[in-house]
């Protein structure tokens, strides 16, 4: 293998730049040529491919977003689009791909490999931490810390006014951000898609808290919770607890941005190197990940089809710590 | 004057604790006894009044919220409530009040002074910076920095995806937070209640940006803008610009919390001392403020009736810097 | 087991309060009485022991330092002191101990167990991450992020002036903080006690960087590096590279403080619960830790005698990423 | 006037990039061509001058350091060097200069104006806030907040161990950073070059604190204090107070870096516009500043020769608040 290319795709996540840097420098260190593709699959089709050097990735390890940009690609869903993409790669002599992204990115990569046989190693970059095959994904730790910082701020105002706050965090199919920021933020309750919590449970918990002289409470809600959005849940709770001063806030897109934490920079750096080495060692259609702190490669078909369960220990912790 | 009391009221603001600390220590330093009233006017009526010592305010200068708590008081709107409050103050021998809060707080204080003649000095504590009689209010600088930090994060993801973001910040009647965080965040446009910007202006600006090869844009909207909320504005813009990838986020209550900035801690400390000295020097019904970096006292009636115009220079700056 | 006590000892670390909170609430949740001992072994001897309730640990999860305070104890080094300590525990009917701290803390705990047989579970709280028996210690992730934030800031000024900076971080016997903040901060080189790097290696690296058109460089030095302090190393490098503009900064005690990161709050919460459950399940003289993301108990004698090697993968990463 | 140039010089300060952005965009908005000179006077001599466009300054408002870099110039101290510099400016048709920097920068600019008559407007960019002619300099607010953040962290560990900390902050001739971070950080004492505090004063204060049951204390020392460095002062205090646990930390270069605060971004933006407008309106040899929140122009000779006194009100505040 002489030439590889890399791209980012799907929702951006803090640490993607640290991963780009690691892929580029690892490739050069290991005597490969390395090309950057802009705008993910869309740029692959349009031919936005250019050679990267060591200095191309200077001074980006600490930045949020992705210098290679990201986009959804309707064209890549067509056979014609994928053929164009493949031809562009061949034109540059590219023999292997590093795809940094999430579920959708890897679904595309897997299909592309099946059709054209070009080896691809995926690196998990998504704040949701919902990928089978890695204990952690790039961006998750930063997103949790961002959510936590917001929860810390909101607790100040909740405590000053004896209020109950419902705080919605990201996580359409997964409660990872909610459960970790909830424990870290000292939340009274965490509502996630993986567990079923009823409105009555919420009301009971709030009343218990009031009886135990808690003057304010924070409930963290994952956006994909089965009871609805934080706003919807709060409206239903209000009906039963007219005397409580209940507020709602949704943290939104701030969770996607910001400079990455140390954890994410190091994870991204490790995965970037391991992705390049995976390609060199003959990996063909895998996602690189970290399980029990060790580098592992998981077949892409598995990574996109299996789901990663929430840590039971953490679910139990939220109950114990909120007494 | 031998004994004074202080309280916080209305929406909490970062730096209120630094102001409480300054009032307490300044009073003790100047040989006064000082009492803290919890929950604002409500606590005054219920008699939640207790003596404070120098150590009562240790280790709070860096914290958000208010250790004296805040609440709205329906009872204080009644003559009967205010009489109870006055009796409670008399019972403790309190001869002067420091009221930390905003518009509503001072309206109550002014009425209370008119009825009972108890001298009161208000210290402006509100993130909105909308009080006549002070260039800056306690909490404003922190709120702007919090908004700015969020805008910085959102720009990462906006730039990665070539998106347009409408970001709503606090300010029901005032565009101070919007204009300062907009300039600081390099926003393409700022929409505030004090100026009239049409939906067509927004669309024109976005199209100009696109023509100048801006790939992403940020528009900061004060919640009280005459065109509606950020969400409403974005919906109308989307109708005319179907190809732009437009997103909306509302920063919400994180703007009220967090440890105060240096600026707010120092402002709060200065105003706390000046409030106590104002009472000792015979001020009776005023708000203490900082104008042109000097301590000033403004009659409460003026402070609550006059409005503070937005800085024209800053409005012009947003236009120039967003080219 | 009906009654347990907990204390913090040795150098403080961010997350100790989150661990205290978890121990207290877990104990109460599991129907134990729980006592807090102030000032570590010293307070045990002086009898500064008092019952803690669920609300005793409200609103501390986000704070740095330790509400139970910490101190070195000369008296505990004497048999007489330890006997006093034991009597005080017996007086309160305490049947088990949770000791939050590092190497020195556990050495004392182990001795105390050997002499008096009181069961003790140690929870690793030290920014240095140098304890055998846990992949991570409480406070390490926060310290790394603090160091990284400082490195990010210093890179701004290094780049503006084309300077070389030697930055000293904590770690007397261990390079964990150095290696992680170095990788995260994009350092050109990391000098740690576990590897031997000569002054010539440093000079060679700086010259290579200059030849590769790097205009500025950052070298992170663990305080315990065998070549001496950052200042000493820099002085020797300067002699050979008179044209380079070389500066030195030592980050110092800021690395010990600050609110804990999400990672540390969750780690501390998990270890606190596991420490209490360890005592209830008959553990007698162990340190609780996390290995491969699972709770483990390691005999205290092992924990204090074996050393934890630095991750080879990370040492290699620093070389690759700094090209 | 058709063409102007700008440069940064002297120690870098957060917000310089925001000022560069403002100068460039303001110039273009006002129909001027604008050139950037790299490495200050040195680059002027070497001819490192190139045209800047609106997009040249995209995405820098939030960054620390200076994209135009900074350097000391020995050559500019010679008549020959300055002649070369002037010729290079003439070659590009440059008719006016914006110089962003501090004392040394303006001394050079003033001399250059005297010799060659090229109009220059200085914008005060230095963390020290020690320039006559402006209440605030670009970078000062950020440096104070950085120092404050460090003090907040150190207080955690000081409080946990009942320690006294001497913290050295920047300020060779001026105590601005010390006094503001000291008030903001709740320091027990602040030592600055502008006031004379003896070692006996320090010891007296620490003993009073101990008698008032303060268990820990923080003393902020400006590096230029007449009693010496924080380390030297601490050593002398230790001799007299052997029982106190005294530590020292010097914050160092972190104070120069980091993304600018809102205050600094806005100040930098205002001064950048005002510098360009000053040139257009015929200003010839001035520093632009903000006094009482209004834009002002001060003759460069005055700006570099007069000193700005420390605010007496703040000195008094530190005494009152530390009881």
Image (tube, coloured by chain):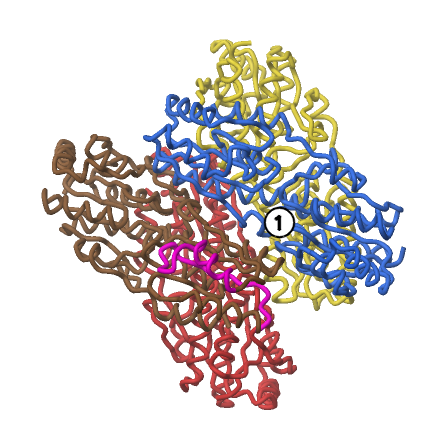
Chain colours: A blue, B brown, C yellow, D red
Magenta-span inclusion, residue B193? no
Q: Nearer the viewer, residue A39 or B263?
A: A39
Asked whether A60 or C139 is in front, the reply is A60
Q: Is residue C42 above or below residue B210?
A: above
Choose between B192 and B101: the one closer to the eye: B192
| Number of numbered callouts drawn | 1
Q: Left of B253 or right of it: where is A179? A: right
- Residue B16 sits above or below residue A184 on the image: below
Q: Residues within 10 Å of mark 1 (few under 14, many from 20)?
A: many
Residue B11 image position (x, y, % from top left): 32, 44
Q: Would residue C192 be found to the left or right of residue B220 on screen?
A: right
Residue C239: percent from left, percent from top? 72, 62
- Residue C319 locus on image (x, y percent): 78, 52
Give me the residue at 66% from left, 35% from top: C129
Query: Tag 1, which secondary structure?
Result: loop
The answer to whether residue B46 is left or right of residue D281 is left
For mark 1, what is the residue? A260
Q: Is residue B233 magenta?
A: yes
Left or right, B298 with reference to A147: left
The residue located at (48%, 48%) in the rendering is D149
* Residue D161 seen in the current view: no
* The N terminus of chain B sits in image quarter: top left
What chain letter is assigned to the residue under label 1? A
Up-down: is B275 above or below B50? below
For the question of whether residue C121 can be seen, the reply is yes
Q: Which residues are magenta?
A: B212-240
Residue C177: give x, y in percent of width and height. 66, 43
The answer to which image quadrant residue C172 occupies is top right
């Amino acid at each position: 293998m002489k030439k590889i290319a890399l791209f980012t795709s799907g929702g951006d996540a803090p640490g993607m730049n640290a991963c780009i840097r690691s892929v580029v420098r690892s490739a050069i260190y290991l005597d490969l040529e390395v090309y950057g593709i802009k705008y993910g699959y869309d740029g692959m089709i349009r031919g936005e491919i250019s050679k990267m050097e060591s200095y191309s990735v200077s001074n980006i390890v600490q930045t949020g977003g992705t210098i290679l940009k990201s986009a959804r690609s309707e064209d890549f869903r067509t056979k014609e689009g994928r053929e164009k993409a493949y031809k562009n790669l061949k034109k540059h002599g590219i023999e292997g791909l590093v795809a940094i992204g999430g579920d959708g990115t890897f679904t595309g990569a897997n299909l592309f490999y099946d059709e054209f046989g070009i080896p691809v190693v995926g690196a998990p970059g998504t704040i949701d931490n919902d990928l089978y095959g890695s204990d952690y994904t790039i961006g998750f730790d930063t997103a949790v810390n961002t959510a936590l910082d917001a929860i810390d701020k909101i607790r100040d105002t909740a405590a000053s006014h004896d209020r109950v706050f419902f705080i919605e965090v990201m996580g359409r199919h997964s409660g990872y951000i909610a459960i970790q920021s909830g424990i870290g933020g000292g939340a009274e309750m965490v509502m996630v898609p993986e567990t079923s919590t009823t409105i009555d449970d919420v009301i009971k918990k709030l009343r218990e808290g009031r009886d135990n002289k808690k003057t304010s409470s924070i409930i963290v809600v994952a956006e994909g919770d089965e009871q609805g959005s934080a706003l919807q849940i709060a409206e239903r709770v209000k009906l039963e607890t007219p005397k409580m001063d209940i507020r709602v806030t949704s943290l939104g897109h701030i969770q996607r941005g910001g400079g990455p934490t140390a954890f994410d920079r190091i994870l991204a750096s490790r995965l970037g190197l391991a992705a390049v080495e995976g390609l060199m060692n003959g990996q063909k259609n895998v996602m690189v990940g970290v399980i029990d702190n060790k580098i592992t490669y998981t077949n892409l078909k598995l990574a996109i089809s299996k789901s990663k369960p929430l840590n039971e220990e953490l679910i139990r912790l939220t109950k114990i710590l909120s007494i």
